[in-house]
Amino acid sequence: MALAIHFENAMASGRLRSQADLARVGQVTRARLSQIMNLCNLAPDLQEELLFLKPYFSGRAPLTERQIRPIAAEPNWDKQRRQFKKLIGSAGRTD
């Protein structure tokens, strides 16, 4: 989430002119850049929740970007919140 916000700010500030430039500088493919940038479509409270997840140091991440992709693709923030709550419930609480 932090990377998505950083990339979004780089584009908004004009430091980089295109997503191709951003992908090159960020050393990711354009497809991966799109996946990362789509996280910016999440409701602001969900973005904040992702930013403040407790860090993990070993084992599997409690939530992955791949799990969050379909939620970020949903344009309705209320539906996003319901989907996210369901995901958190199935993944085990992260706080």
Image (spheres, rainbow, N blue to C red):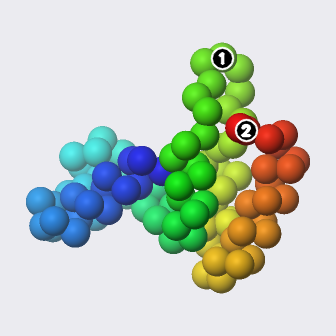
| Secondary structure category for the residue under label 1 | loop
Tag 1 or tag 2, which sits nearer the N-term? 1
| Residue type (three-letter) at the residue carrying disc 2 | Thr
Residue 34, given in percent of the width and then of the height, sits at 44, 62
Label 2, on which residue?
Answer: 94
- Across and down, in percent, residue 54 comes to 61, 33
CB atoms of marks 2 and 1 within 8 Å? no
Q: Position of residue 68 (x, y in %)?
A: 66, 56
Identify the amino acid type marked 1: Ser
Left or right, 40 with respect to 21, comes to right
Camera-side residue of 17 and 80: 80
Q: Quadrant of residue 17?
A: bottom left
Where, quadrant-wise, is the C terminus in this rendering?
A: top right
Query: Which circle, 2 or 1, is nearer the viewer?
Result: 2
Q: Which residue is mark 1?
A: 58
Residue drawn at (71%, 78%), measured in percent from left and top?
A: 78
Nearer the observer, 67 or 27: 67
Residue 78 appearing in the image: yes
